[in-house]
């Protein structure tokens, strides 16, 4: 294996060994604490533009799963591409063993031209990121490259679909605004008797008929999605149910008149505890975001729904009288936990109530 360097914006240089594509790449260096699920993490569009550090020491031991297309999407991965800019791990298992393995992690990264670096003290690196915050970095081979801040780009436009796509034939017509949607969100919705209309991030969904509106996860600064926020602001003037996840809560927060801010190092793990406000109920959640809604700036008529028990940041908001709510975590998490998947049922229950009320009003 060839030597390669991870260079951080504060001047730190870490030498390791190359796997995957032998090429240089730049992005924002972040970490995830998940023990498993690296194929899902690497194909999560919310990681677009980021160099991902996996804190779990052993990576690659179960390879990459064999894909099938079911219901027009991958049966196992979160999208059709590897979205990270680079991967940093402690120990790379060149030999893999799993009943559904198709290829090694290194082969998979190389096929997508994504560099990896291992033999790195990821515990020390994670400690630095926790103290200093997420910072710019680059994986460098023989050819040096400049740093690049992905948060200055409209990353959502790079991961959203370019045209309207339809799935399923259920009784509830749901518009899914694709800001970088994970496939498991689509699976969870299709499992609940819906016709799903997936539209691009900048599509004016107010021009079509639907029963409920869903805003997906996605990468980067939500304020780069000004056109989406304007369309959502129009929808909030109505009364059709709206549910948002991850970037979706940030867009809803901005559309209703609140503000968002960048977290120090973000929440990227499968074990973040959140509490439902007004109750003693606590849920373990999967998260992947670098920005959050400023709960203190919610306007009248809105309230917090969940809060993060580690740092007190906002994990959910809802309207006090209209059927609008959103959460910062991932109820559809793959590979888990799925403690909060019931929120999809609550959304569809609101859709059902809206349709019944609409019929009653006509009668």
Image (cartoon, rainbow, N blue to C red):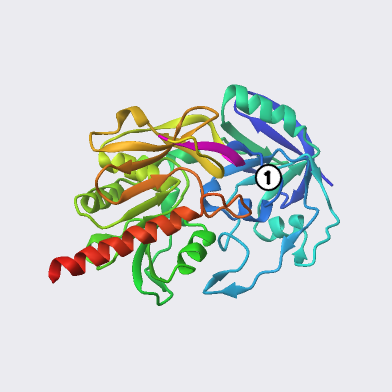
Q: Residue at x 20, y 65 (%)?
A: 358
Q: Residue at x 20, y 54 (%)?
A: 238
| 224 relative position to 93: left or right | left
Q: Position of residue 96 (x, y in %)?
A: 83, 58
Please identify the residue farthest to the bottom as the structure is shown: 169
The picture quadrant where one finds residue 284 is top right
Q: Position of residue 33 (x, y in %)?
A: 66, 39
* Residue 200 visible, this orientation: no
Position above or below: 19 against 188? above
Tell me the quadrant of the picture where the C terminus can be found.
Answer: bottom left
Q: Residue at x 38, y 61 (%)?
A: 348
Q: Position of residue 70 (x, y in %)?
A: 57, 74
Q: Which residue is mark 1?
A: 87
* Residue 237 visible, this orientation: yes
Position above or below: 240 against 168? above
Q: The magenta stretch spans which residues?
A: 268-278
Magenta-drawn stretch contains 273: yes
**Is 257 in front, or is 113?**
257
**Is 6 in front, or is 241?**
241
Position above or below: 95 against 31? below
């Amino acid at each position: 294996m060839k030597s390669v360097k991870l260079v951080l914006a504060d001047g730190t240089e870490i030498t390791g060994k190359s796997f995957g594509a032998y090429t240089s790449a730049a992005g924002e260096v972040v970490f995830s604490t998940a023990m498993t699920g690296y194929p899902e993490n690497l194909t999560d569009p919310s990681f677009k533009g980021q160099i991902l550090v996996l804190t779990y020491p052993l990576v690659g031991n179960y390879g990459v799963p064999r894909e099938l297309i079911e219901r027009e999407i991958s049966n196992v991965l979160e999208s059709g591409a590897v979205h990270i800019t680079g991967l940093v791990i402690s120990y790379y298992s060149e030999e893999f063993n799993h009943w559904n393995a198709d290829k090694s992690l290194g082969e998979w990264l190389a096929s997508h031209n994504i560099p990896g670096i291992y033999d790195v003290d990821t515990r020390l690196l994670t400690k630095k990121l926790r103290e200093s915050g997420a910072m710019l970095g680059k994986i460098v081979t023989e050819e040096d490259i400049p740093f690049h801040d992905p948060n200055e780009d409209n990353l959502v436009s790079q991961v959203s679909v370019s045209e309207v796509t339809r799935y399923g034939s259920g009784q509830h017509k749901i518009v899914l605004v694709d800001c970088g949607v994970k496939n498991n969100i689509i699976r969870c919705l299709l499992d609940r008797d819906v016709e799903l209309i997936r539209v691009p991030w900048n599509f004016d969904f107010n021009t079509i008929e639907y029963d409920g509106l869903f805003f997906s996860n996605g990468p980067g600064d939500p304020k780069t999605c000004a056109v989406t926020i304007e369309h959502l602001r129009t929808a909030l003037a109505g009364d059709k149910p709206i549910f948002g996840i991850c970037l979706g809560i940030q867009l809803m927060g901005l559309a209703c008149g609140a503000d968002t801010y960048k977290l120090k190092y973000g929440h990227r793990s499968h074990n973040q505890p959140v509490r439902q406000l007004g109750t003693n109920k606590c849920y373990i959640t999967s998260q992947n975001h670098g920005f959050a809604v400023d709960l203190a700036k919610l306007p009248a008529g809105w309230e917090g729904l969940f809060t993060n028990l580690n740092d007190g940041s906002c994990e959910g908001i809802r309207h006090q009288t209209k059927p609008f709510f959103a959460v910062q975590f991932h109820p559809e998490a793959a590979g888990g936990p799925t403690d909060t998947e019931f929120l999809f049922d609550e959304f569809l229950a609101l859709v059902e109530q809206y349709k019944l009320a609409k019929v009653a009003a006509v009668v």
